[in-house]
């Protein structure tokens, strides 16, 4: 119960890593608002863990502001924000990725971090405490070919995490990131281009531990970094990658 009496917002929580983090947080005692565009799936998990489902597009400033206001009203206060929502473009030569795909990747993966900070940091500063966890990717540390602009968006997220941590530390706010390797999530097929035994074997050959990351792996790491046990840890971008980045 390391998160007992804590409240959390987890974006992209209806599936994949976000669902794993929401479930782990609830198991550790937190009350969780699960934010996702997939209202039905988010609602099912919310019912399962005793959380609150909320539909929002995290790349839209007005919707993010409403999301934060609703969270503070319904939860009483917010202790933790997990910026997990993310998308990718399909594998392609960098010059062939469309402008629309580029804009969408950076809106969801990067602009959303700015929007949630703009809306929630004043609340954290008022309370002199708060915890932000950004879910980046090993793609931002050790880029894969043909995912160029996705790689860049996750590298941006790691730099933003460190910059936020330095600026917000005097206000008692911690900011960290997790860099998972490719995992058993709905985005896996998009990363690989096609989900075949051969393509899975190719991806797995780059991971020394020999398996993909799981929602449980991310949930466990997130619960530690967002708990009082990690009270002296801020500004780290921790790989959860089976040594892929070494």
Image (cartoon, rainbow, N blue to C red):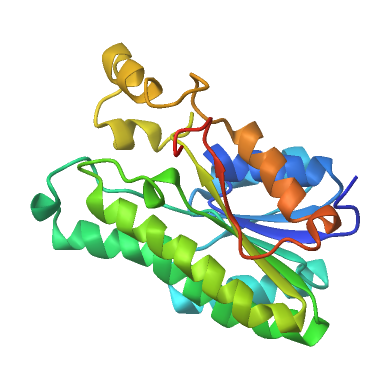
Q: Write the residue at 22% across / 56% down.
A: 101
In the rendered image, residue 112, in percent from the top left (x then y), is placed at: 46, 68
The quadrant holding residue 201 is: top left
Picture quarter with the N terminus: top right
Residue 232, compared with residue 89, is above or below; it is below
In the rendered image, residue 147, in percent from the top left (x then y), is placed at: 25, 45
Residue 55, compared with residue 76, is above or below; it is above
Q: Residue furthest top?
A: 197
- In the image, 87 versus 206, the foreground residue is 206
The quadrant holding residue 129 is: bottom right
Residue 72, compared with residue 58, is above or below; it is below
In the rendered image, residue 164, in percent from the top left (x then y), is placed at: 57, 75
- Would residue 57 be visible to someone looking at this image? no
Q: Write the residue at 78% across / 87% down.
A: 126
- In the image, 59 versus 2, the foreground residue is 2
- In the image, 66 versus 106, the foreground residue is 106
Q: Write the residue at 49% across / 26% down.
A: 212
In the rendered image, residue 62, in percent from the top left (x then y), is placed at: 49, 79
Q: Residue furthest left?
A: 96
Q: Residue furthest front?
A: 246
Decide if residue 199 is on the left or right side of residue 82.
Answer: left
Q: Write the residue at 41% across / 66% down.
A: 110
The quadrant holding residue 157 is: bottom left
- Would residue 93 be visible to someone looking at this image? yes
């Amino acid at each position: 119960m390391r998160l007992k009496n804590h409240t959390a917002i987890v974006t992209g929580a209806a599936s994949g890593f976000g669902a794993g983090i929401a479930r782990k947080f609830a198991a550790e005692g937190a009350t969780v608002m699960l934010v996702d565009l997939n209202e039905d799936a988010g609602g099912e998990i919310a019912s399962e863990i005793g959380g609150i489902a909320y539909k929002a597009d995290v790349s839209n400033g007005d919707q993010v502001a409403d999301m934060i206001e609703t969270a503070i009203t319904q939860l009483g206060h917010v202790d933790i924000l997990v910026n997990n929502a993310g998308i990718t473009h399909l594998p392609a030569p960098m010059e062939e990725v469309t402008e629309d795909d580029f804009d969408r990747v950076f809106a969801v993966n990067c602009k959303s971090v700015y929007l949630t900070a703009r809306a929630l940091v004043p609340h954290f500063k008022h309370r002199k405490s708060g915890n932000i966890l950004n879910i980046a990717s090993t793609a931002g540390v050790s880029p894969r070919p043909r995912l160029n602009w996705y790689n860049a968006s996750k590298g941006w997220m790691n730099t933003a995490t460190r910059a936020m941590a330095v600026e917000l530390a005097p206000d008692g706010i911690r900011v960290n990131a997790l860099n998972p390797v490719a995992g058993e999530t709905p985005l896996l097929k998009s990363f690989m281009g096609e989900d075949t035994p051969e393509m899975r074997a190719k991806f797995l050959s780059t991971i020394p531990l020999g398996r993909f990351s799981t929602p449980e792996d991310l949930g466990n790491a997130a619960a530690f970094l967002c708990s009082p046990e990690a009270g002296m840890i801020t500004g780290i971008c921790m790989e959860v990658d089976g040594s892929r980045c070494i």
